[in-house]
Image: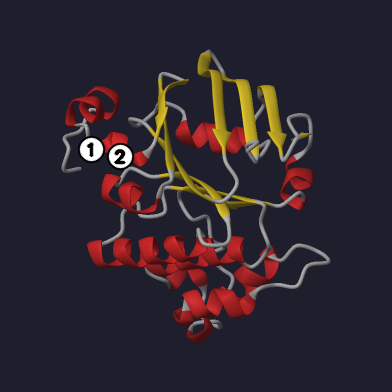
Amino acid sequence: MPALLEVRDLHVHLGESHVLQGVDLDVPAGGITALLGRNGVGKTTTLRALLGLMPRRGSVRLDGDAIEREATHRIVLRGLGYVPEDRDVFAGLTVDENLKLAVRDGEDARYDLVYDLFPELKQRGRQRAGTLSGGQQQMVAIGRALLNRNRLLLIDEPTKGLAPALVADVARVLERVAESETALLVEQNLAVVRRLAGAIVVLDQGRVVHTGPPTDLDDEALVHRLLGVGHAA
């Protein structure tokens, strides 16, 4: 089956740094592909480059269509949703206003889905997003992306900085999302990756160094070599 997303020879330079050095990866349609790697190897840069948020060189095809020369807003209109690493909620706006701003023109917003997944967002609709806890802000960030029907979701570190109970909540939400959406997920929590991912891609020094099934994470020596962490991470 052809990949939904095909990336070939993707390069990104940031000043003097050659951050991405020819990334090749495929994301199959349906389910979650996890993008892994040590800190600073280019995972967030990869997601931002796919969205056109930074200058990049290479080939990016979404469902067969070349998008590497398109502006970010055009890429988003093609059906790419984005959950950024640091949530990036509008602190001075209410929860309702944060959600409303995310709705794409001409689309029927899926408020029922978002409130089913995150009932607390409906209860806190008039509360300013900047006064929410980190976990609640993460709900807003994921909810904004899910309001629209996405061909592909780019999700960056959704469990970062969350308490274990909230990590489990986010994992349950993403598990449900994966039933109907395709996602490329950056995640450091390997227990979450094992639970959610159908495939893994590992970056190191700006290049893909491993692809395979999530069962590869059961190989302690491989995990330590690729990620520098132990099996139980």
**Where does the image place residue 229, in percent across and percent down from the top left?**
20, 33
Q: Secondary structure at mark 2?
A: helix
* Residue that sits furthest to the right in the current view: 106
Tell me the distance, in whole angstroms, between the alpha carbons under discs 2 and 1: 5 Å
Where residue 180 sits: x, y (%)? 57, 62
Residue 70 on image: x %, y %:
79, 35
Residue tagged 1: 218
Q: Along the line of sight, which residue is nearer the eye, 232 or 13?
A: 232
Judged from the image, the secondary structure of the residue bearing numbered disc 1 is helix
**From this viewpoint, is residue 74 visible?**
yes
The image quarter in which residue 41 lies: top left
Q: What is the image's colouring?
A: secondary structure
Q: Count residues near mark 1 (Cα–Cα under 10 Å), then give few for <14, some for 14-19, many for 20+.
A: few
Q: Which residue is mark 2?
A: 215
Residue at screen point 27% across, 37% down: 217
Q: Is residue 162 above or below residue 220?
A: below
Q: Amino acid at mark 2?
A: Thr
Residue 121 in view (yes/no)? no
Q: Is residue 223 left or right of residue 74?
A: left
x then y, percent, for residue 65: 78, 36
Would you say 73 lies left or right of 19 here?
Answer: right
Left or right, 61 with reference to 49: right
Question: Considering depth in this image, is 187 or 221 the residue closer to the camera?
Answer: 221
In the picture shown, does residue 126 fall above or below 97? Answer: below
Specify few, some or many for label 2: CA neighbours under 10 Å numbering under 14, 14-19, or 20 or more: few
